[in-house]
Amino acid sequence: ATFISNMDAASTVDVRNRDMENVSLSLTAGFPLPTRVTMEGAAPGTPLPGGLTMLIGSSPPTQGTSPNQPVDPSGSFSIPNVGTDDTRVYVLPMLTTPVAPPLNIPDSLQGVYVKSAKLGGVDVLNTGFRFAGEPDKVLEIVLARNAGSLAGRVEDERKQPAAGVFVILVPDLSTARLYRTDMYKTTSTDAEGRFEVKGLPPGDYKIFALAGFEKDSWVDPEFFKPYEERGVSIKVGEGRVFTLETPLSVVRQQ
């Protein structure tokens, strides 16, 4: 797949030990995607905070620039050149692409999270979408400020506090892990094995305590497959501190 001068093209080719010849790509223009962003609880007419950008990622990822547009303070605008392979919703700097490094979040956006994303009234935040220029479809993004928090502690095999252990949160639903990068959170335990994570988008998480792993190795979507049963499922509510009643057990690299 490729993206050239606001047009995209893609083709599937079977190579199998031979040179690739006479492969043609037909360039097609994308569509403007009408978008509306609102902040839950804000008074009508209140401008949105600055520094927000909408980005639409493709599946599979393409070379070049993905469709993107700074969020207008009024909340109403269009994202240009959205193609039929552009299926993933990202709201920078909170909800970024899986391969992008974490972005600095300005003070005005601290604690802000993406509460919902719907296209034509259908949830697309956790599943992705398909848009082919339908005139009656609007991408509706709702932001909120009442993020949740999580506190707990980790014990080792001897039931002693585990210090300096990575604590990782990911979406509990494995299929959502391709989309919900905002639910990936990392911290580490203190000398007493305790940890706290703030600014969590409400939802269902799975939490792991990892020791002996290289930092950020869990970004790979396949990483948790051997350890899935070792994680603990939790639900974080809006504006609430969730405290683990039972200590987490350390998962060590084999």
Image: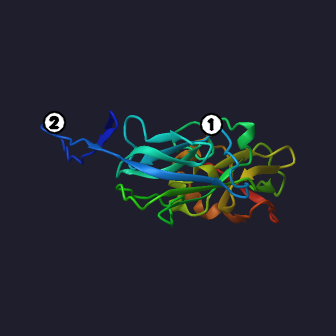
What's the residue at 77%, 54% (across, down)? 156
Amino acid marked by disc 2: Asp
What's the residue at 73%, 40% (across, down)? 108
Q: Is residue 171 left or right of residue 20?
A: right
Crowding around mark 1 (Cα neighbors within 10 Å: few <14, some 14 to 19, many 20+) is few
Q: Secondary structure at mark 1?
A: loop
Q: Quadrant of residue 101?
A: top right
Q: Is residue 188 left or right of residue 194?
A: left
Q: Which residue is mark 1?
A: 103
Q: Secondary structure at mark 2?
A: loop
**Rendered position, 139 above or below 246:** above
Q: Can residue 231 be spotted in the picture?
A: no
Q: Position of residue 70 (x, y in %)?
A: 55, 39
Q: Which residue is mark 2?
A: 19
Q: Earlier in the sequence, mark 1 or mark 2?
A: 2
Q: Position of residue 181 (x, y in %)?
A: 58, 49
Amino acid marked by disc 1: Leu
Q: Can residue 12 be spotted in the picture?
A: yes
Q: Alpha carbon of mark 1 to alpha carbon of mark 2: how far?
A: 41 Å
- Which residue occupies the extreme front position in the image? 45
Crowding around mark 2 (Cα neighbors within 10 Å: few <14, some 14 to 19, many 20+) is few
Q: Quadrant of residue 19?
A: top left
